[in-house]
Amino acid sequence: MDSLYTKAHIRESLDPRPSTPEDDMQWLAGASAEVVSRVRASFPAPRVPAAVLVPLVERETGLTVLLTQRAETLKDHAGQISFPGGRIEPEDKDAWHAALRETFEEIGLLPDFVEFAGYLPDHHVINRFSSDARGRLRQPRISTAHRRGRSSRCFEVPLDFILDAANHTSRQRKLGDLTIEVHDIPYGGRNIWGATAGMLMTLRRMLQSRGAASR
């Protein structure tokens, strides 16, 4: 079966430049302006800028999403599934280069095997980080020699699986006195949730609402 989305469609759907503050919080698309405003107010300020990579891997069977799972022995966010990336440091030229640097340091993905596809809107998280996620294409070459121990393993999930609403599980989450609906994506005994699932839901929404399908 052909993939639901082609590389051309993905490039057309993503933003060629970083988002503006008005473009963030797209994981709440469909919520009222009042709800979005109250959710914005619930996040701490100031926010620490961070950048993550959303690696889309070209396989013979179709595109997959490369994810990491943090080691169970870590003090913070043990076992959490996430995208490779981290804090933007002063020496980084921009968020793009920060994402490449952090990804190489975390999982050994060489920048030469990363092809820019576009940006997702900023995604604010409770721990004061603002993750500027962006899509990437090409099959990666990962060197375990460069891992710093922050992630216990990498794994891949078919993009079509992630984008299929039938594979999403909805639940309620409390933010102060506000209750909002969020989605988890169970796969292979793991559960993709939180900011990672939120960014994937934003990617799904952008692919469905922008660009022309290319077959």
Image (cartoon, helix red, strand yellow):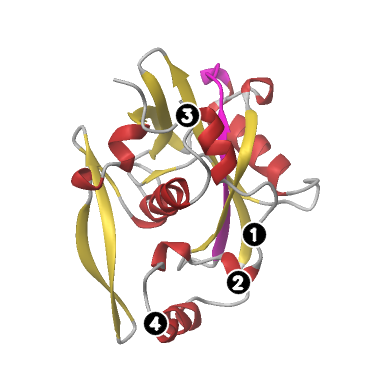
| Measured Cα–Cα span from mark 4 to mark 3 | 34 Å
Image coordinates of residue 92 in percent, x first then y, are 77, 46
| Measured Cα–Cα span from mark 2 to mark 3 | 28 Å
- Earlier in the chain: of badge 1 and badge 3, it is 3
| Measured Cα–Cα span from mark 2 to mark 1 | 8 Å
Could you tell me if residue 147 is visible in this image? no
| Residue under label 2 | 22
| Residue under label 3 | 6
| Residue under label 4 | 35
Q: Amino acid at mark 2?
A: Glu
Q: Amino acid at mark 3?
A: Thr
Could you classify mark 4 by the number of other residues whose Cα lies within 10 Å: few (under 14), some (14-19), or many (20 or more)? some
* Residue at 64% from the left image edge and 22% from the top image edge: 110
**Callout 4: SS:** helix
- Dot in front, 4 or 3: 3
Image coordinates of residue 108 in percent, x first then y, are 57, 25
Specify the segment rendered in magenta. 129-145
| Measured Cα–Cα span from mark 1 to mark 3 | 23 Å
**Callout 1: SS:** loop
* Residue at 59% from the left image edge and 35% from the top image edge: 103
| Residue under label 1 | 19
Q: Amino acid at mark 4?
A: Val
- Earlier in the chain: of badge 4 and badge 2, it is 2
Q: Amino acid at mark 1?
A: Ser
**Callout 2: SS:** helix
Image coordinates of residue 98 in percent, x first then y, are 69, 43
- Earlier in the chain: of badge 1 and badge 4, it is 1
